[in-house]
Image: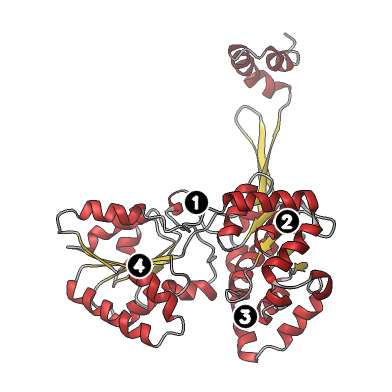
Amino acid sequence: MLRLSSSDAGFAEAFARVVADRRESAIDVAADVAAILQSVRERGDAALAELTAKFDGHDLDRTGWQVDLADCKAAFEALDPALRDALELAATRIRAYHEAQLPEDRDYTDAAGVRLGAVWNAVDAAGLYVPGGRAAYPSSLLMNAIPAKVAGVERLVVVTPTPKGEVNALVLAAAHLAGVDEMWRVGGAHAVAALAYGTDRIAPVDVVTGPGNTWVAEAKRQLYGVVGIDMVAGPSEILVIADAKNPPQRIAADLLSQAEHDPTSQSILITDDATFADAVAAAVETELTGLATQATARTSWDDNGVIVVVGSLAEAPALANALAAEHVEIATDDPEVLFKQIRHAGSVFLGRMTPEAVGDYVAGPNHVLPTGRRARFSSGLSVLDFMKRTSFIQLDDAALAAVGPAAVALADAEGLPAHARSISVRLGQ
């Protein structure tokens, strides 16, 4: 774990190295992924079957290409009632939050008499990648599928790796609750290729969203343009801005909530109290001893954890904006003071009683957020990722007479006489 103090000589350079550290996988998979995509594009289902046998250890023709939606319903009904209630609460809150995001169409006539506006429509089909095996997250399925359905997507397709042909029961239950239309037992870069290009069995989609490993992220990056994507996500990260009034154990738990995701995840604390920083560091060690995910969280904290002691928390917003972290917690008496200065963050959690993890499950806003400083230019997943805007224009004789001559002048200036003629012929010129 790295310890920094803003009063030390060389702090700016040391902090700049933290900001620039990408923590991406050291393995270059671009060429391997490109070969997989080409194989699926050329060979379709045959390539999917071969790659599934290779990576997931089962024969799709024997275990079944699709998950029966009746099995999803059965898995949901078989859940422990408390867990089923928890999933339903999460789904209800996620749906309500995203329904409020739906954009409004515009239709108006301006001072020149030109009718202008735009209409919003959902994409026809969306594909959702759901990790399988150890990293099986029903909450992620809800966060991806529900906004798509709220947007009005008619066909929602899930692909998920199924090691040895087995699907996580909670993922099946979440798929039922979210109203998934198709679920396929394929994962990895080849599943993303199938969604983008289509095969004999799997019809193509328009947008692909959802988390995955390095191969999945690279497949999405290479296929952008063939399909829309949500984002190319990297390792998880959390930045906690906290004063000494917080119990150290709480802040330690918050830092580890992201460290347990992956050895390359990053947890950062900014505080104005060196003694509190020491207490949090000690609390992290205590929390780690009882954590089932200790090995992963330990590596993440030791390799990527950072504690920054500042002279005043007034310094924190500038540091936070430079980091542009996926998650930012502000655990102070009046978090609004600092929040108003935070310009770059995936999602912000305000106050001492708002741990980031509540946002992962039941708060409502989407937990699919930009990582790796991408919050400088992108936002978390929303209904807009499953929609597109079409503008429209309508002119009558008077409106064209008002604005047409200027368009003719510009077209002529650009050396495009046919453009100009298409307007001037209507102006009687």
Q: Amino acid at mark 3?
A: Leu
* Picture quadrant of residue 225: top right
- Residue at (65% x, 58% y) in the render: 189
Mark 4–mark 1 Cα distance, whole angstroms, equals 27 Å
- Residue at (62% x, 19% y) in the render: 407
Mark 4 or 1, nearer chain start: 4
Local secondary structure at mark 1:
loop
> Dot 1 corresponds to which residue?
378
Can residue 318 be seen at all in this image of the molecule?
A: no
Mark 2–mark 3 Cα distance, whole angstroms, equals 27 Å
* 330 horizontally vs 393: left or right: left
Q: Nearer the viewer, mark 1 or mark 2?
A: 2
> Dot 2 corresponds to which residue?
195
Is the Cβ of the residue at disc 1 closer than 8 Å to that at disc 3? no
Q: Nearer the viewer, mark 4 or mark 2?
A: 4
Mark 4 or 3, nearer chain start: 3
Local secondary structure at mark 4:
helix
* 264 horizontally vs 53: left or right: left
Q: Amino acid at mark 1?
A: Ser
Q: Amino acid at mark 4?
A: Asp
- Residue at (71% x, 83% y) in the render: 76
> Dot 3 corresponds to which residue?
87
**Which of 299/411 is in front?**
299
> Dot 4 corresponds to which residue?
303
Is the Cβ of the residue at disc 2 closer than 8 Å to that at disc 3? no
* Picture quadrant of residue 50: bottom right
Image location (x, y in percent) of residue 204? 77, 53
Local secondary structure at mark 2:
helix
**Which of 78/427 is in front?**
78
Check the image and name the residue furthest to the top: 429
Mark 1 or 2, nearer chain start: 2
Local secondary structure at mark 3:
helix
